[in-house]
Image (cartoon, rainbow, N blue to C red):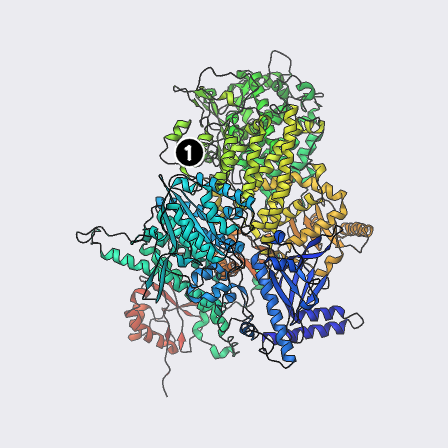
Amino acid sequence: VRDDDRRVRVIMTTKSSKMSTNAHGSTANLADAASASASKVAIASFLTKRGGKDLYGKPTWRLRFFALRRSRHARERSVIRYFANEPADASETAAKGEFVINGKSSVRVLDAEETFTEFGLKANKFAGKRMFAFQTLPSDGNSGALVVEAENLALMQRWVTAISDAIAAARAVESEAAGQTLTSSGVNAEEQDALKGKNFRGTLELAGLCGPLGGGALPVHLDACWENLTFVDLMADSCLNERLGRQHRPKYVRETLSALVDSAITVSRCLSASAIQMSGPESNAMGSIRRALEDMLSMARLIPVGTKDNNLFVSFLAAFLDRVKQLRAGELMMVPGGWANAEGGAAVIYTIHRLPAHFVVSLTNCGDGLEYHPMKADPAQDAFKYIATVQLMEVPIAVAMDSSTWALLFRPLVFPHTAEKAKDMIYNKVLPMMNSRPLLASVTPSPLRTVQFAKRPRGLDASGVFTALEAARCGLASLGCPPSRADALVNLGVRHVMLEEAKRDLERVNMIGASALVTLQAACRTVSDYAATHAELLVAAEESMSPNGSPNGASAPTKPAPLSRDTLAQILRSVEAVMQKTKALHAATTLPPPLAPTKLPPTSCAVPLFNRLAIEGNVDALAGAAKAPPILRPVELTMVPDAIDSLEQVPKALRNALHCCTILANQSDLMPNSYALRVSLLVHLFVHVLPAPMPLTHPERATKCFWASSKATYEIQAEILRSLNLLLRHFSAAVLSISVTQTFDAARLLTIANFAAIADATLRLKVTDAPSAFIQHYAGYAEGPISAFGFEIGPFAVEAEYLRFHCPERTARLTQILDYFHSLKRTISKDHMIYRWEDESAGGMSFGVGEARLIDQVCLQMGISRDVPEYLAKYHTGEHREFVDSYPEMRSLRDILFMFKLLMAPTSDALPELARWKPIDAALDWSVTARDGFFDLTVSAFGRNLAVQPWKEPELDEGGKLRTGWRNVFGGGFFARITDRRPRCPPSGANPSNLAGSRIDTEEDVLHLPDVPTFDNLLKQSESELLLTYLTAPMIRLPLVMKLFSDPTRVRGITHRDIQSIIDAVMFEPGPWSPPEPTNVPKEIPAPTRAHMATPSGLLIHELIHCPAPLVDSAEELLALSLELDTGRHDAPSAQGVLFATRMLTRLLAFVSHIIKSNSLDTEFSASTGITRGMTCSSAAVSTLKDVKLRIKRALGDKCTPVLKRWLGHAVKKNAIRPACALHAHLAYMHYWTPRDEIDKQAARTILTAQQYIFVNYSFADTPDGSAATDRKLADAGNMSGVDTGLGFVPTEIFDLFQRKRRSVLEWAAANPKDANQILEEVVDALTTKKTDGSRSPTNVLDSDENFKTNRAWRRAPGAGGAGRFVSYVSDIPFNELVARDKQASEELLRRHVHYGEWLLETTMQTFEMEINTQLGEFTVRKNRLGHLEASIREMPDFIAALGPVLSKRGIESSHFHELAEEETLTIGDSGDVVHCAEVQNTEHRKWMRLVGLGHDIQLWDRDPRPPMNEFTRPYVSRVQSSVSAVEALGRAVGSGGLEPCEQWIAQLLEPIARGPGAGFLHGVELFLPNHTIHGTIARLAGTGAPDNAVEEPWSFFRRKKES
């Protein structure tokens, strides 16, 4: 039965069954469904349609979804329908209109002035756009014509081709009905071929590469590389001809030029991916060629092709000449050129190479106009060979920089000419004029080393790829590369990369047609021919060498071979792999389906020896009893407020945070991202919610400080300190379980510093009822001759210089905390400083003098024993518990300060290893040991002893340079990286020493560097030197670095991760901190220190307050230049630059807004953030910053947001999950600093959709999970960039985003329930988006019935813990009735259960149709939580072997599922792709999970508890002595005395083996027989022991039956 017949039969059955069950209803929908089933969608996409006229008489244009349906039956006609949006139902009942296709219909591409005029369009306005018109009946006029615009040329070609095929089919049907032949109807030969059943689609069929099976029944993989015209032209040119080449040339010159530029970019991409090893000079030259090819795009956009506009032409010439004048000696550039005419024109490449005394101008052309190039006869091919590149040597500098010369050369491209006139002007007039000699005189009898003869492309180079390839080869040779080597690197290297791409595309298809087979085989032949040429050169070079490696004979040295044997062998393997794969995939289209296996009785295949295979049968009984489902307790992170107004609210906020952290910690195995959620919650609480204390020396501290101005009771004070101590455990365990990046290290240090500052401020509260004696003495409130105590912060002020903060509130908070700690240092005397563990002069890690004095004073007041000196130390450690039990606040302060100073260790060796720590692991255990008058302290936690690293204050050395305890003044981890094994976090990108690899303090140090980084040749060495020089001047580096990269020639550099890290560090690292003291102006130059260059609030805030214009101008220019490189795709190389510029501008906008608010009269803002030193600016500066804010908001809203949304749509259609997650994250990040009162529907939609999409589809590999892949990632602490490759952000920044906006969004949702209901529906749609092939994404397997969506609504989850959890319900049910049902169900649960655990389990297991949890970012359908498959499971060899190909076809980690070579390690899980799973059953010995969307299940078993069954218990040696015989002799040899009479044949067969080849194997082995007597012809024995010579295969014995 054919597939078509089966499909029709199923449809008819479905229709009849529906009609029988709905006999009383309407059958209109069934008819529509049957009609839709009787046709197929040939093509569908969004097009821009011309509509009616508006009130002002101007035509309107609307974006509509179009679908062309081709009928499956000959008597039904095809139809074009359009819709307002993509239809959800197959019947397409929501169509806004349709156009029927018949044999008289016509479709035309609008590409000429007369065609635009014919359809009422202005040619000067619509020229160059991809437009076509369709008319059902052309005789009716153009008023009813369908005029549409396509997004790109390829889409327009597919639509025109599909409509043309439908018209041709309609003509055939009408002609057949009328009894006419196709010839009498006036149909040409090409249309006759189309009507014979060949439905060509794609570039291959359009190029004529179609075999006998190349019809429309075979799948056409339009996204495969062999469907690209560039691939067909370059790799399958031997299969093309001139007719096809002319047929596929673009209709107008703009498309010709675009095709050339696209091919040039493709060649550049292939050159970058080439596997051929290159030397340093070759790599630099190749980088110059790649940049020249890619820069053609920007120049092509400036050329006013065919416009005849003098003004635009002059502007282009000015920009072009500027680029030429910027060329330095040795540099080159490429620019597209050619001529325009009515036939589409032609495109060439001009290469301009500057030398010290003159220019070299080259013209490369492989298409029309090649007849003007030098040629020679090729008798072997009966054809001519041409020099495709004409080089004009010694072009004077004055001529090359004269605009009139280039005006004449580019004039045919702007002002259309006939082809002959244009070629005559360029080749016979302009080019000879440039170097004052005839054109052919530039070609000497022996051609230049840079050019070579080659045959003309058979397809006339329709795509321009041959021109781009030849320009690259010639340019590489011009830069000094040997000609044969340049030919190998370009011609063979590019083709090899394309063949590798075809190899990868073949891995994800199931079959290919004959056309693809022809193309790929031709590609293999092409690569083989080029490789054979270089193989001959290799053989010749090897034969000319003597065995010792020197040339044979006295002749000149032999030229080295351009390619090595290994490279040629790699190319050969690629060719063989593609050939084998294409044959296998094409065989599936030509062979009949395999026969079904015959069903035979089991006895017909019974072989006794197969009993060794275990046949378990049904193993469900071995799974054991079902485990009790876990109680998943809900978490309400919104219990922690976003702001507090009074001291009484502080204990409640701390207790709520402790409650959330406790639940997250105890359920870390059930809740994903538990550690990151706890960190983001506590960072938000201590940095953004709790106010910072004002310095002790501030004159208004008593009235304006949140802490000092409040009166408290001891209950509040003790509760705050108790909660701080418990939260410290959660925070320490969480931050030491997450991998460290620059921003995360800054956040955790700032947070723990806030712990210390708030603890100190709490101890100094004015307690009104019953203050503690310890607190009275610490704060200095006790009576008597006492003074207050305090502590030092050690290296925190030096560390703060390199703490990277993207958030202005954290930068301001850093200033407030540093000012507070500085006031302690200035107020507290040195002998009253406690916990000076980092100061070796004060005893280091020992019980200090300050602690002893403080405890001694308390003991004196309270009468606690102090006779033995050791007692005070043990009171401090808690070994004597009476002091700590009475004054737990001392323990809280001690533990907080220890963790604060521990986390500032310069290397991670001093910190606990990265693991999944529990809060109890972070509990500090103190002990004291007496030593030579000191009491050494031992602190243990996290399974090891911990100690604070020693440090000393900065001081001047003998050379006048400032040094510190473990970092120099430009610190950032450079010396830690050199001297220590593992730095605490990746070093700073703003430190020039880190970039250069040697110490750099001044500009002179840069000049002495032997080598500078070029960042993969994105920067020249001179530009890198300039960058390093800028970094040596921290005070002015910010505008200089931004100006350096906001240049068209260097903007591509921001796509490099290291350059992104440099700009990020320069902009957001605060630099040296200036204490609130008078600054000493230096009296000599250079100054001994840079203390006078320090700022109170960071370099960025200082720059914005005093001179924002240069910085903002450069940032906007950087964004604009990045957007100019946009190719419309999310996976383009330039996309990373656009995303980085978006992040940078978003953060810059936040800093500008914060400065404006700090200088406003907003009392609420001042109360929540406090007073920050260094934020005050003049009214004129505020006015300037307001203008800057508007400019940045306009740039982000008008430029960035549309681009990101367009990329997001493209990524979702291509099922590119990880890029879609990154784009969602960037769109949500643009609302990071949106105020609460400005949250609207768009912001809520963006944030909620991003949260759900990212948490469902992205796996954050920031915490150890037991897998080797994650351990490898987290062990890489040397990554200098610190930028997450998955989302563009470090993971903690994503969690900070949702923690910051969670409460605001939920408050908006509560105030706008209708809009919130719509947004939640859109969230569900985003999680279940259909792919382009119609199948659903993996998350859709858990979807509910589609009909339920029509009447679905959302509400808060009932019961406790329902805040932020939205569940769906049927909107037809009144809300009051739902509330009553919930109350009734709650009462029923109370009546049904007596045990609290059972009641709690059933309460948390309530089932809803759908649930969206905005607290944790979870999406649940019918209580099936969608999770991520553990990386440890994905690393299992069984998983890789069974599901590797399946996941590879789905695009999940396809690069990791491959055969491993020798010494190669498996790296499964490193890509970050997610495999979704849902738990099916969890029993005692088995965990059963379903892989969502993959059609496979995973069953994870533990060790089998059953004892092994052993039926071999009868010893082979008998205890009864048998008679002396041959058998007994054999028994003495191998132990065969216990055989029954019917088993004696075993000994007879075993004897020759035991004495012969099995002697070594059986020696020392004790044999056993089965329990039963062996009566058959086959015997199995089991042996135990250690054989001398083990063999892989077992031995088998059998007795051959006697013949009758």
Residue 576, visible in the rendered structure? no
Relative to residue 1253, is residue 1060 drawn left or right?
left
Q: Residue at x 58, y 65 (%)?
A: 161
Q: Is residue 531 visible?
A: yes
Q: Position of residue 843 (x, y in %)?
A: 47, 22
Q: Is residue 564 above or below residue 769?
A: below
Give coordinates of residue 1308: x percent, y percent. 73, 42
Q: Residue furthest left?
A: 554
Residue for point 52% across, 48% down: 303
Quadrant where the image shows the N terminus = bottom right
**On the picture, is 1567 further left or further right than 407?**
left
* Circle 1 crowding by C-alpha within 10 Å: few under 14, some 14–19, many from 20: many
User: In the rendered image, which quarter contains the C terminus?
Assistant: bottom left
667 relative to 1040, above or below? below
Q: Nearer the viewer, residue 727 or 1158?
A: 1158
Of residues 264 and 1480, the one drawn nearer to the viewer in this rendering: 264
Badge 1 amino acid = Glu
Q: Compared with residue 493, is residue 403 higher up or lower down, i.e. above or below?
A: above
Q: Which residue is farthest bottom?
A: 1604
**Where's residue 439, x and y in %?**
37, 52
Residue 22: x and y, percent?
A: 77, 71
Please count the marks in the image: 1
In terms of image quadrants, where is residue 769?
A: top right
Q: Quadrant of residue 1489?
A: bottom right
Residue holding disc 1 = 1025
Considering the numbered disc 1 on the image, is that residue within a helix, a strand or a loop? Answer: helix
